[in-house]
Image (cartoon, helix red, strand yellow):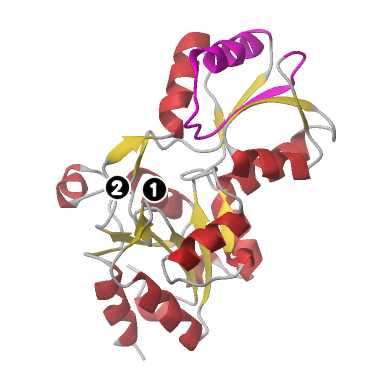
Amino acid sequence: MKPLSSIKNLIIDMDGVLYRGRRPLPGAKEFLHHLEERETAYILVTNNSTHTPEEYVAVLKEMGIEVSPRRILTSALATADYLGNLLPQGARLYLIGEGGLYSALAAQGFEFGERGVEAVVVGMDRQLTYQKLKTATIAIRQGARFVGTNPDKSFPAEEAIVPGAGAILAAIEAATDVKPTVIGKPEPILFQLALQRMGGTEKETAVIGDRLETDILGGQRCGLTTVLVLTGISQQQDLEASHIKPDYVFQDLIHLDEAFISLI
């Protein structure tokens, strides 16, 4: 286990770590403030593709948390980066997703349509319809690539645990017999982009997350120190039953902050 004292950079998940729905979680504001005071580099990383970094800044500000857009990295941005290196500019995509994903892909110069598409790109879509699933299925069966922003089958909303992008991917996979290429955690692309932004190394970086099968597993695959907080998806009983074991477990950010403060 790597000591917390060796950590110089943090990759911090948002949903289930900093907030649930529109409600900030205990200690979130203070934890980020203390990181700023200690000049600890950090990036807020999320598998959620529905918002742009600027929209996340506004959401966080409503909760009393102020951060710069440059500190926010979404699976939508990582997906756009991946496809930008794979497909020619102006390639046509079929999109199941919301504004954050559309904005990131449009900024890369992609076009959108239902016919003659080179890739079907799927993220969280709270306006999902059978027609969208049908169009995606036909395009993939005709040879389009199948790309998913993230595999999260659920995510922690304020009122309850609700379906996520992974549930949509599962429906399309069942209809096409084609597995998607997944960009978000636990795959390495988001972590690698975060490290590039901070100029950090794996040895001096930790990931803080609430989900064993994405945040913690992804961090382990990339050689990062892993920290689980029990304020989101994964709970103590999940931890006990799982083969995925984080380096550290804290009840919430208050207790994690206390551990970091004790190192000063």
Q: How far apart, in angstroms, are the residues tagged by discs 2 and 1? A: 7 Å
Q: Position of residue 237 (x, y in %)?
A: 14, 47
Residue range of the region highlighted in magenta in the rendering: 115-142
Residue labelled with disc 2: 244
Q: Residue at x 84, y 32 (%)?
A: 88
Numbered disc 2: secondary structure: loop
Q: Which of the two discs, 2 and 1, labels the residue nearer the N terminus?
A: 1
What mark, if any, has residue 155 been given in the picture? none
Q: Position of residue 158 (x, y in %)?
A: 31, 49
Q: State the residue lying farthest toward the right.
A: 89
Q: State the residue lying farthest toward the bottom.
A: 264
Residue labelled with disc 1: 217
76 is higher (above) or lower (below) than 180:
below
Q: Position of residue 238 (x, y in %)?
A: 20, 45
Res 253 → quadrant: bottom left
Q: Residues within 10 Å of mark 1 (few under 14, many from 20)?
A: many
Q: Residue at x 25, y 44 (%)?
A: 243
Q: Position of residue 255 (x, y in %)?
A: 24, 74
Numbered disc 1: secondary structure: helix
Which quadrant would the N terminus be assigned to in this image? bottom left
Q: Residues within 10 Å of mark 2 (few under 14, many from 20)?
A: some
Q: In the drawing, does residue 52 fall left or right of residue 22?
A: right
Q: Amino acid at mark 1?
A: Leu
Q: Residue at x 50, y 38 (%)?
A: 150
Q: Amino acid at mark 2?
A: Ile
Q: Are marks 2 and 1 in contact (CB under 8 Å)?
A: yes
